[in-house]
RNA sequence: GCUGAAGUAGCUCAAUGGUAGAGCAGCUGAUUUGUAAUCAGCAGGUUGUGGGUUCAAAUCCCACCUUCAGCUCCA
């Protein structure tokens, strides 16, 4: 028998018999590794450990710590769940059951039967029972015809539909115990690896994600190799609920949502408004340093404006219906600020010497989001963009892109937020979705990529994620529940200058088209604050905290001294509150702790005599006494530096 | 928009066809207090809205509204 060369991740090469398996390779290294191994990466593809290797290959043994290992684990768990469902509810039809970022799901069709929480518990129990048999996941290949025959006999229309796209190919199947599934794999060696199981919820999902198709029931679950890891995961989910901005927004009186005003139309309470306005002032200051000028435009605009831009009727479905006047004029609640800004650009002739012109506005826009889409502050129907449009010459474009990216990065750095950067391109297969000519797109996508590369950005590419007028650089952040939201964005636009016939006079005396950059570092104030609440778990850094200091006199005898301290803080432009309530100090402290106020100053007899304050920091407790000046200097500095730690 | 679940006092929750209740918050009074809850009293509700079944509905049925989970969509 001939031998093959296996290259390990560290570069060492070892000879194995042809047809050796990942399992055998793992065993050749150590028993422990063989016990932990879940799958095998072969030349960049993930394989089962039991699959024979017939040619020279570079391999990596995947364990729980590797994404490939986790995915195989959860994929196998989905099959185990399907087996349990089939055992408990015979006749169930199966859609797809893939692993996801955390866990897995399976889409199933049970006719009219709607699963309940009790059903999930039953299925979970059955899964434990089936896992305990510790049977192997076995790969098998069938001809396409045999595969079709199998699912025809079983009566699984969804699998047959999937097979239609694989017509003529060799089809791989996996089975474990009594369950057989159409599947690419890979899978883990056996069901016994799955030691801890939790089915989380059941929700509707359209077959193949198309709302014209039948709605299936999707069961979400997660599994782990140990009970301890499951417990930790469940604890993290609880923690996430605790940080949920919708809950904290109410508890801390930051914003309010009520059907009396309308779904998706948040009201900013006084404390939330402080956070919002502090953020706005921060960005305005940074923009002034970078040559932006502020403009203000109205909340509605003539419908013709949006016909010119192409937004109407293209995005009709996601706009509030037009307001019609008796004379036939129609107005739209503005779904974006750009057309108004373009009119400001057009208000007078522009010279190449004027460019770049950077028009900035915290402009409120309205979009008719679908009713099932609203979510706290992160998805709303009325929101304020930290919008700006940069009109520049082509030779200035790349530099301007870099400057906007730099500003966006500064924003996220200031809050210590982790972002993922996406270059959002258009989908070449679906070009009618986008405006403008192909040449513009190619140029814009190239320029964005060059700017990103020159800045050394760590990005990934999102095909089909572009806006309809141009490609973007998007900054994505996850909320506590793991959902990804787009915050900041930088977009290059060659389309609007054409549509609006924007011009400037060049040094050659000829008319030229400017290029536009649309950019919003926060994205929307609503979404950004929502994410920020979760990021800080409601414990805002000092410079953002709605109330920065609470002054707590011990008894009435110290009220006047407390008032002096409070006034001194206010004079220094700090947000202070004096707690004059007739309560014990322990009560007041507890109250201000729950409000997550960064500092409490306890003032009693001692402090009054020594002209000091006794400082207590949120979550850190008593810091001891300090002179009033020392405390003031400390907090003023932390505010100025936008310090995250104090 | 679709599928499913839910909606009781400002908040968190109880009451399964028979007089809507508790804790916290609020108000009043007493207490003058030293680092996470002092005590007592008062007030607070057309049980999301509208209709229906019933001698009787928070509870059962229908429609709508809102919220939640997910799908779809997202300038």
Image (cartoon, rainbow, N blue to C red):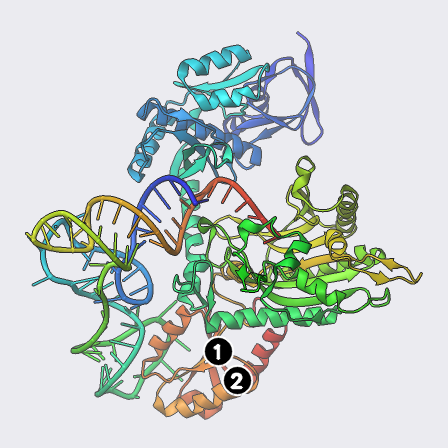
Percent from the top left, x then y, of residue A282?
A: 63, 70
Residue A182 seen in the current view: no
Q: To which quarter of the image does residue A303 belong?
A: bottom right
Q: Nearer the viewer, residue A305 or A195?
A: A305
Percent from the top left, x then y, of residue A557?
A: 36, 92
Residue furthest toward the right? A508
Kindly identify which chain the residue marked by label 2 belongs to: A
> Disc 1 on helix, strand or loop?
strand
Q: To which quarter of the image does residue A591 belong?
A: bottom left
Percent from the top left, x then y, of residue A144?
A: 54, 13
Residue under label 2: A569
How many neighbours does mark 1 have within 10 angstroms: few (below 14), some (14-19), or many (20 or more)?
Answer: many
Q: Nearer the viewer, residue A123 or A596?
A: A123
How many neighbours does mark 2 have within 10 angstroms: few (below 14), some (14-19), or many (20 or more)?
Answer: many
C-alpha span from label 2 to label 1:
8 Å
Residue under label 1: A549
């Amino acid at each position: 028998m001939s031998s093959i060369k296996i290259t390990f991740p560290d570069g060492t090469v070892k000879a194995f018999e042809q047809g050796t398996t990942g399992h055998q390779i793992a065993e050749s290294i150590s028993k422990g590794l063989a016990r932990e191994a879940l799958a095998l990466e072969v030349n960049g593809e993930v394989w089962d450990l039991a699959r024979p290797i017939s040619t020279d290959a570079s391999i990596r043994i995947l364990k729980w710590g590797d994404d490939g290992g986790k995915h195989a684990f959860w994929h196998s768990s989905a099959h185990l769940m399907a087996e349990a469902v089939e055992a408990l509810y015979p006749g169930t039809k199966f859609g797809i059951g893939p692993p996801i970022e955390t866990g897995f799901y399976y889409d199933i069709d049970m006719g009219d039967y709607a699963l309940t929480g009790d059903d999930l518990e039953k299925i979970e129990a059955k899964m434990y029972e089936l896992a305990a048999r510790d049977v192997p996941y076995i790969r098998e290949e069938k001809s396409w015809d045999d595969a079709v025959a199998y699912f025809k006999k079983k009566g699984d229309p969804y699998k047959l539909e999937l097979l239609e796209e694989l017509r003529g190919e060799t089809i791989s199947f996996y089975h474990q115990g009594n369950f057989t599934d159409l599947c690419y794999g890979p899978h883990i060696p056996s069901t016994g690896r799955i030691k801890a199981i939790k089915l989380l919820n059941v929700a509707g999902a359209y077959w193949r994600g198309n709302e014209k198709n039948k709605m299936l029931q999707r069961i979400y679950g997660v599994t782990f190799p140990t009970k301890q890891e499951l417990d930790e995961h469940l604890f993290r989910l609880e923690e996430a609920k605790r940080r949920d901005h919708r809950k904290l927004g109410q508890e801390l009186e930051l914003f309010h949502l009520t059907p009396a005003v309308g779904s998706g139309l948040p009201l900013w309470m006084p404390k939330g408004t402080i956070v919002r306005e502090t953020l706005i002032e921060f960005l305005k200051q940074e923009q002034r340093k970078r040559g932006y000028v502020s403009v203000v435009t109205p909340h509605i605009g003539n419908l013709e404006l949006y016909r010119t831009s192409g937004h109407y009727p293209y995005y009709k479905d996601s706009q509030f219906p037009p307001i019609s006047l008796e004379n036939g004029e129609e107005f739209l609640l503005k779904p974006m600020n750009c057309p108004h800004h373009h009119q400001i650009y057009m208000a007078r002739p522009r010279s190449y010497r004027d460019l770049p012109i950077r028009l900035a506005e915290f402009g409120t826009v309205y979009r008719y989001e679908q009713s099932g889409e609203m979510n706290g502050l992160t998805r709303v129907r009325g929101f304020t963009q930290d919008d700006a449009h940069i009109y520049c010459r082509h030779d200035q474009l790349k530099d301007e892109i870099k400057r906007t990216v730099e500003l966006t990065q500064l924003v996220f750095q200031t809050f210590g937020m982790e972002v993922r950067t996406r270059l959002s391109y258009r989908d070449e297969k679906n070009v009618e979705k986008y405006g403008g000519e192909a040449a513009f797109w190619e140029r814009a996508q190239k320029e964005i990529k060059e700017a990103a590369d020159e800045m050394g950005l760590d990005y990934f590419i999102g095909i089909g994620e572009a806006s309809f007028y141009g490609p973007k650089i998007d900054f994505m952040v996850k909320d506590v529940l793991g959902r990804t939201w787009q915050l900041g964005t930088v977009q290059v636009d060659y389309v609007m200058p054409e549509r609006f016939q924007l011009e400037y006079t060049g040094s050659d005396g000829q008319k030229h088209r400017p290029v536009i950059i649309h950019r919003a570092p926060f994205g929307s104030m609503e979404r950004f604050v929502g994410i920020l609440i979760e990021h800080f778990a409601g414990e805002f850094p000092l410079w953002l905290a709605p109330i920065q200091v609470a002054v707590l006199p011990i008894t009435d005898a110290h009220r006047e001294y407390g008032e002096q301290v409070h006034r001194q803080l206010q004079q220094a432009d700090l947000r202070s509150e004096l707690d004059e309530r007739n309560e014990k100090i322990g009560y007041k402290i507890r109250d201000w702790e729950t409000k997550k106020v960064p500092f409490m100053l306890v003032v009693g007899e001692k402090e009054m005599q020594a002209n000091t304050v006794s400082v207590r920091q949120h979550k850190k407790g008593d810091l001891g006494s300090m002179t009033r000046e020392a405390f003031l200097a400390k907090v003023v500095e932390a505010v100025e530096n936008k310090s995250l730690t104090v």
